[in-house]
Image: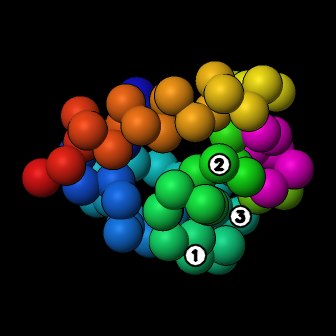
Amino acid sequence: MCPNLNGLFGRQSGTTSGYSYSTANKNMAVIWEESTLYDYLLNPKKYIPGTKMVFPGLKKPQERADLIAYLKESTSS
């Protein structure tokens, strides 16, 4: 189960209720913005060592930019 992504931008990592985050994710306290998502989506396990995220990342810059644009549009509250 994944946390709800509505209101993602401006939210701190590891804070959505009802989801069991890794200690690493909670302690990293990332504020999700375009720049942090861009870095995170390249390699989640490198960005937050110890995360439970199994997503390997998106290596192509345009794919990350496109995903962030989609998320920004579809998750605004």
The answer to whether 74 appears left or right of 39 in the picture is left
- Quick one: quadrant of the N terminus? top left
Mark 2 neighbour density, 10 Å: few (under 14) some (14–19) many (20 or more): some
Mark 1 neighbour density, 10 Å: few (under 14) some (14–19) many (20 or more): some
Residue at the spot 64% in from the left edge and 23% down from the top edge = 63
Q: Which mark is residue 24?
A: 3
Report the magenta residues as a range: 42-47
- Cα separation, mark 2 vs mark 1, equals 16 Å
Q: Which mark is residue 29?
A: 1
State which quadrant residue 53 falls in: top right
Q: Is residue 19 magenta?
A: no
Can you say whether 9 is above or below 65 in the image? below
Q: Which residue is mark 2?
A: 38
Dot in front, 2 or 1: 2
- Please report whichever mark, 3 or 2, sits nearer to the chain's N-terminal start: 3
- Please report whichever mark, 2 or 1, sits nearer to the chain's N-terminal start: 1
Q: Position of residue 21 (x, y in %)?
A: 53, 54
Secondary structure under badge 2? helix
Q: Mark 1: which amino acid?
A: Ala
Q: Position of residue 22 (x, y in %)?
A: 63, 55
Secondary structure under badge 1? loop
Can you say whether 24 is above or below 66 in the image? below
The answer to whether 50 appears left or right of 17 in the picture is right
Q: Mark 3: which amino acid?
A: Ala
